[in-house]
Amino acid sequence: MFTLLKTDTTTAARLGVLQTPHGEVRTPVFMPVGTQATVKGLTPQMVADTGAQILLSNTYHLNLRPGRDIVKQAGGLHRFMNWNKPILTDSGGFQVFSLAKFRKVTDEGIHFKSHLDGNPLFLDVKDCLAIQDALGSDIAMVLDECPPWPCERESCEVAVTRTIRWAKEMLQLAKDNGFLASGRHLFCINQGSVFEDLRIRCAEELAGLDFPGFAIGGVSVGEPEEEMLRQVGIAAPLLPKDKPRYVMGVGTPPQLLRMVALGADMFDCTMPTRIGRHGGAFTPDGPINVKHLRYREDHRPLVEGMDNYTCKHFTRAYLRHLHHATESLGGTLLALHNIHFLQDLMNQAREHIAAGDFASWSKAWCERYEAGAKDEIIDKD
């Protein structure tokens, strides 16, 4: 169940609480990504200490390795990875499209080859739900077809039609097998690439179905930021007001605040850990890269007064040293800081929505961050 507590009077920002079998989630919320049942470089306790309320894991990866049966034997994903808070699992559809060596999509499902060993596999809505059920997900995602960017309108229209069809089929399966009766959630996914009428059609058709939650997918797949925000702005108002809205795979700190202002409630991204492994750190004055020479004798914390383990105990100079010495602790400490930074940002957003001054606060916050940006963060694996 999702309870909408307050909507900002100046923007569409919302304050809410989502109840799950493993506890409540206060929104807006950022979900760290633990794709393969681990947030890279961090222990579950480290992640919990950042204030993270919920994690994301991935159906595709976990079904290939170690396999749904092993996770189920362990008592579900929560026990397997020692995380006792809520878990959302992505359907695996995006990974099939981005990682599979070969794929053929039909209305019945997706034929593809494993990126690990090349073995032929098939994923349909029934198996997609069965895997997430075996994992013990608090929030499962429907199977969808995510169009690439750029894409032709005709192929996008086919993907939207198929996404709606699969959403209907998976919702009925979740009702029939008791998945929803157990208090767990199933979210559908709005698609449509950059075609406004397809986004609207998809959002309106999905909004007519009684899903517990709604996601906006197919953004942050290579399109310009302005286009990404435009698509979120088109879709979000068309989704039910009394259900959570989840924008998938985003984003930078200013992007998160701007999408909160558009009415989005939930976000996930691998960015905090990924950039941390390459020396990148979020600060209120923009992103920095500690590998630069200017930090060699900089004995300040990443952010003065920020209450996380990295900022309380280590300096920029030390973090620079770790990265130049190729010590893995450097990536761990930066990942820890970055995840905490986004948790703190979402906590501030919730406080300012409650106080009624979210619009002015978020505008000033983004202006400071963007004006102070110093470096291009190394953003690669």
Image (cartoon, grey):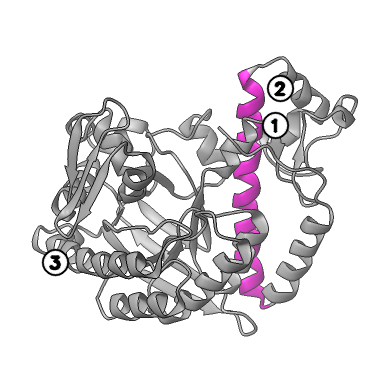
First of labels 3, 2 by sequence position: 3
First of labels 2, 1 by sequence position: 1
| Quadrant occupied by the N terminus | bottom left
- Would residue 345 be counted in the magenta stretch? yes
Q: Residue at x 62, y 62 (%)?
A: 225
Tally the marks.
3
Give the amino acid type for the residue marked by disc 1 in the picture: Gly
Q: Which SS class for mark 1?
A: loop
Marker disc for residue 279: 1
User: Answer yes or no: do the residues labelled 2 and 1 have beta carbons within 8 Å?
Assistant: yes
Residue 273 drawn above or below residue 88: above
Residue 127 place in picture, x, y as percent: 16, 48
Instruction: Count residues near mark 2 (Cα–Cα under 10 Å), then give few for <14, some for 14-19, many for 20+.
Output: some
Q: Residue at x 62, y 72 (%)?
A: 353
Residue 58 place in picture, x, y as percent: 35, 42
| Quadrant occupied by the C terminus | top right
Q: Residue at x 43, y 38 (%)?
A: 34
Q: Which SS class for mark 2?
A: helix
Marker disc for residue 172: 3
Q: Which residues are magenta?
A: 328-356
**Residue 241 visible here:** no
Magenta stretch, overall SS: helix
* Mark-to-mark CA distance, 3 and 1: 46 Å
Q: Which residue is mark 2?
A: 323
Q: Which SS class for mark 3?
A: helix
